[in-house]
Image (tube, rainbow, N blue to C red):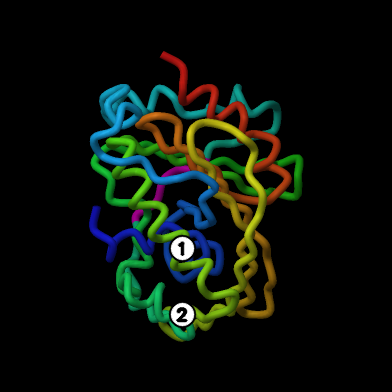
Amino acid sequence: MRLSTTTALGLSALLALTGCSTSTEPATASSSSATPVQEGSTAAKASTPLSSAELSERLLSEGDLGEGYTRTPQSAVRHDDVTVIGCPALAKLGGDAATGSSLSFPHKAKASFTDGGSNNSEVSEELYSDTAAKLSHGIGTVFDAMLSCPTYQVVSGSTVIDMGTTKASAPALGDEQWSQLLTYSAGGRRSVVKQTAIRTGTILVIVSGSPALVDAHLVDAVRTAQAR
C-alpha cells in the first residue's frame, strides 16, 4: 500500500464537505486498540481477500439504514493542490494525495447516504479487502499520523481548513478498532465528523459521518460485511 495515497483516509472527507473537491467520499482516521497482525500469522491466513464485486454485495443499502435515507451518487474527484501545515507526520505521507477518494487497497466498495429526516446528515461506508496484515499496517500508519497532531491546517486552493483531532472510543467489534472525531472549521463553518474503522479478518469497514449516524449504523455495517 502506497503511503502517499493513504492520506486520502481523513482529508478527502473534509475537502468534499467544504467544497474543495467534488468527491462525496468521507474517509477516516483514528487510533488502534489492537496489536497489528503479522503477515505470516494464523489470523492473516484465516481467509483470502474478497473481490470488489463481493465487497459491493456487503455494503449497507437504503433498506438496511431505514426510512428517509437516500443514496448519494458517486462523483468524480477534482484533484486540487493540497498542503498540510503543522503536522509533519501527515505532510510526510504526501499532501498532494489528500484529495483521493479512497485508500489504495486493491479491492474496495463504497456508498454514501443522506438522512433527510436528520437535517440532511450524511453517513458513508467504505469496505476494503486485503491480507489482515496489510490492512492493519496501512490504515494504522495514517491513523497514527493524524493523531500525532491535535491541531493542524489543510490548504486546498484558496481554502484553509483548521483541523482538530480527538481520539474516540470504538466498540469491541471485529479484530481491530479505530475511532476519532475530526473537527474542522472553514469558511465560517464548523463541523464534527466521526470516523470509525473496524477490521474483521480480511475486510476493513469504515463508517464516517455525523457522530449519531455512525454510532447508529456501525454494528449493522460490520455484520453485513461479515455475511457470507
Q: Which segment is the magenta one? A: 72-76
Q: Under tag 2, what secondary structure?
A: loop
Q: Which residue in the protein does label 1 denote?
A: 144
Residue occupying image coordinates x 29% and y 32%:
41
Q: Amino acid at mark 2?
A: Cys
Mark number, residue 28:
none
Q: Under tag 1, what secondary structure?
A: helix
Q: For the stretch drawn in magenta, what is the main secondary structure?
A: loop
Q: Amino acid at mark 1?
A: Asp
Residue occupying image coordinates x 28% and y 62%:
3
Residue occupying image coordinates x 63% and y 29%:
65
Q: Is residue 91 left or right of residue 4?
A: right
Asked whether residue 200 is drawn in magenta, I would say no
Asked whether residue 75 is drawn in magenta, I would say yes
Image vertical order of residue 51 relative to residue 169, above or below: above
Q: Which residue in the protein does label 2 denote?
A: 87
Identify the image quadrant of the C terminus: top left
Front residue of 211/62: it is: 211
Q: Quadrant of residue 165?
A: bottom right
Q: Is residue 26 left or right of residue 53?
A: right
Give the alpha-carbon distance from disc 1 to disc 2, as whole Å: 11 Å
Q: Is residue 158 left or right of residue 191?
A: left
Of the residues tagged 1 and 2, which is closer to the observer?
1
Residue 207 locus on image (x, y percent): 55, 43
Q: Residues within 10 Å of mark 2 (few under 14, many from 20)?
A: some
Residue 226 locus on image (x, y percent): 46, 22
Q: Residues within 10 Å of mark 1 (few under 14, many from 20)?
A: some
